[in-house]
Image: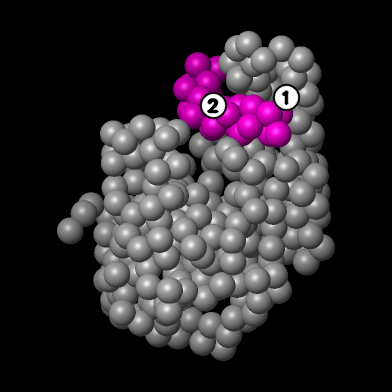
Amino acid sequence: MTHPAQHQDLGHGITVLDAEYIQPGIAAVYLMQQGDQVAIIETGTAFTVPHILELLQQRGLSAENIAYVIPTHVHLDHAGGAGELMALCPNAQLIIHPFGARHMIDPGRLQQGVIAVYGEENFKQYYGELKPIEAERVIEAADNFELDFNGRKLVFLDTPGHAKHHFCIYDETSNGIFTGDTFGLSYPNLTDGDEPFIFATTTPVQFDPEAMLNSIDRLMALKPEKMYLTHYSAITPTQSVVEQLKDSVLAFKTIAEKERPVAKDRQQRIEERMMEYMLTQLETLQSPLSVDEISAFLKNDVTLNAQGLEVWLNK
């Protein structure tokens, strides 16, 4: 067995488990238990699956108790482990956005796309292997799809902006929403006060700022008490948090548009402007980390965000 991954009970039968993706505190998986049934929301990568099974074992459960595996979208830090997990869970069905289903049934194109961006060596290091899932075990959740999860109502909401194959899941029991990447990224280690630091993710290749703002408004119209972020863990969506998130969408869009006229070294300039924005925000929130520590921690997100903005500009 692997060493136990970090996890925390959030109440309402919901546990957040560290996916151990790249480094701790970056990506989360959620276990939702309702009676003797379990839903896994987000899967992390193939390397996350043993941690999921170990946590189940600690709870006196097994892979046979998993009824549903639910990635919010098919990006591999969210769905990379879905095939591996489904292969080990005989009673589970996969629930996925209609635009993402084919990539879970036949992940070949998805895998090649990721290798094209990251290279084969990095792909194997971070994601392992993508396993196909039998089509008859896949449920496509269109907008407003409702799931009766052992007496617990889950509602699936189409939320483009980060990706066209993205849904969020409203859980009536907790009055919370599993937001994937729609409600941005908020890393707890970057702040130690009451106010979290949150920012939008614009990673390749389907960033759409207007759709993202509309999706955020749609989620907030439900008046949720909690947002269960994949990156990372639960936050309370206060008015100031929502404003900070929306401001980041507009700020990143503005940064990209200002750099639009000159294509040479444009991505690098976008990265520099974005990092400046992040550091200014965190200075206001009085981060306990040094500028160098913040820059090192956020470098990967800033690079990916800049790549996504470059794609958006080229469209």
- Residue 66 falls left or right of residue 284: left
Residue 59 is situated, as x and y percent measured from the top left of the image, at 32, 73
Residue 7 is situated, as x and y percent measured from the top left of the image, at 40, 56
Q: Quadrant of the C terminus?
A: top right
Residue located at (78% from left, 24% from top): 257
- Mark 2: give few (<14), some (14-19) or many (20+) Cα within 10 Å: some
- Residue 81 falls left or right of residue 187: left
Region of the chain picked out in magenta, as a range: 288-315
Residue 16 is situated, as x and y percent measured from the top left of the image, at 46, 59
Residue in the foreground of this view, choosing between 49 and 25: 49
Q: Which residue is mark 1?
A: 256
Is residue 67 in the magenta section?
no
Residue in the foreground of this view, choosing between 56 and 312: 312
Q: Which residue is mark 2?
A: 303
Residue 219 is situated, as x and y percent measured from the top left of the image, at 74, 60
Residue at the far left: name it.
1
Q: Amino acid at mark 2?
A: Thr
**Can residue 271 be seen in the rendering of this structure?**
yes
